[in-house]
C-alpha cells in the first residue's frame, strides 16, 4: 500500500451512497478513502484526525450546509481541495461554491468513471469541472442581452463595455459613426444617463442583477 496515495473524505447525508463510493475506490492505488460522513461536524470531529487532501462535499447537508462548510475547511487546511456535488445545475450555486473556494463542481448522480475522472483532474490540475457545468457558466456570462434594448442597441452595448470607440463600433457594424451616435443616445435615454461613464456603471449594475436572477 503506497503512502503517497491521495486521501479522500466524503460528505453526503445519504448513507446508501457510502458502499457505492467505497466500491468506486476499491483496489485503486491512487486514492485512500479516510471516511464517509453525513455532516460537516462529523468530519471535523473525526477522532482519527487524519487530514484529507480532497473532500467530496454535497451542497445539501444537515446542520452546516456544504456551502458554509467550505469556510470551515479552508480554515483547517488552506491547501485542501473541495469538490462540491449537487443535483442542481444552478449558476448561483456554482458561483457561490467557487467564490467560497471550491475547486470543482459536479452533478449528481455520479458514476464511477465521472467520479474518478474528476478526482484525477483535481489531483493533477487543481480543478474539476464537467461539461454540463462549464456550459452553464459560459452561457451565463455570454447572456449580456438586455430586454429593454433592441438587437442593434445590445450589439452596441457589447462593444461599449469592451472599450470600443464610436468609430470602431461603426466599422464593426458597417454603419456610419452618426448612426452609432443615434443608437447610443437612445441607450442613454433608456438608461436615464448623460454620459458614457454613467451608462457603463448602470449597465454593469444591470448585468449583475441579471446574473443574480439566472
Image (spheres, rainbow, N blue to C red):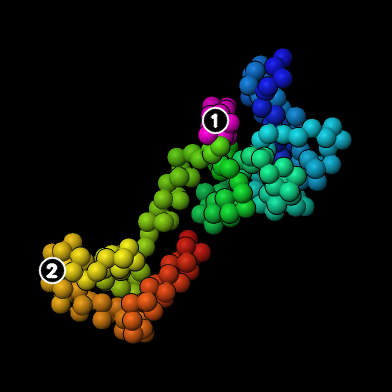
Question: Residue 49, located in which quarter of the rendered image?
Answer: top right
Chain part drawn in magenta: 110-125
Q: In this view, does 14 lie above or below 92?
A: above
* Residue 78 pos. (x, y %): 68, 44
* Residue 115 pos. (x, y %): 57, 31
**In this view of the protein, can residue 13 be seen by the observer?**
no
* Residue under the point 70% across and 16% down: 2
Q: Distance between the residues labelled 1 and 2?
A: 49 Å
Which numbered circle lies on residue 175?
Answer: 2
Give 159 or 97, whichever is nearer the viewer.
159
Q: Do the residues labelled 1 and 2 touch (CB within 8 Å)?
A: no
Count of number-bearing discs: 2
Q: Mark 1 points at which residue?
A: 124
Which secondary structure class fits the magenta region best? helix
Image position of 83 (left or right of 45): left
Find numbered disc 2 in the image and state the secondary structure of the residue it sits on. loop
Amino acid at each position: 500500500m503506497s503512502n503517497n496515495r491521495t486521501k479522500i473524505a466524503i460528505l453526503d447525508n445519504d448513507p446508501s451512497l457510502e458502499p457505492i463510493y467505497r466500491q468506486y475506490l476499491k483496489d485503486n492505488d491512487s486514492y485512500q478513502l479516510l471516511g464517509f460522513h453525513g455532516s460537516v461536524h462529523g468530519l471535523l470531529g473525526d477522532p482519527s484526525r487524519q487530514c484529507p487532501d480532497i473532500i467530496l462535499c454535497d451542497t445539501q447537508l444537515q446542520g452546516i450546509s456544504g456551502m458554509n462548510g467550505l469556510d470551515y475547511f479552508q480554515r483547517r487546511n488552506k491547501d485542501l481541495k473541495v469538490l462540491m456535488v449537487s443535483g442542481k445545475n444552478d449558476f448561483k450555486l456554482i458561483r457561490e461554491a467557487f467564490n467560497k473556494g471550491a475547486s470543482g463542481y459536479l452533478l449528481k448522480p455520479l458514476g464511477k468513471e465521472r467520479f474518478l475522472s474528476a478526482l484525477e483532474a483535481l489531483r493533477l490540475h487543481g480543478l474539476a469541472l464537467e461539461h454540463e457545468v462549464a456550459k452553464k457558466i459560459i452561457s451565463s456570462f455570454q447572456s449580456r442581452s438586455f430586454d429593454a434594448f433592441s438587437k442593434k442597441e445590445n450589439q452596441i452595448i457589447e462593444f461599449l463595455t469592451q472599450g470600443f470607440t464610436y468609430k470602431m463600433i461603426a466599422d464593426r457594424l458597417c454603419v456610419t459613426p452618426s448612426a452609432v451616435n443615434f443608437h447610443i443616445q437612445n441607450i442613454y435615454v433608456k438608461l436615464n444617463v448623460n454620459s458614457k461613464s454613467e451608462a457603463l456603471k448602470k449597465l454593469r449594475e444591470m448585468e449583475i442583477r441579471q446574473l443574480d436572477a439566472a
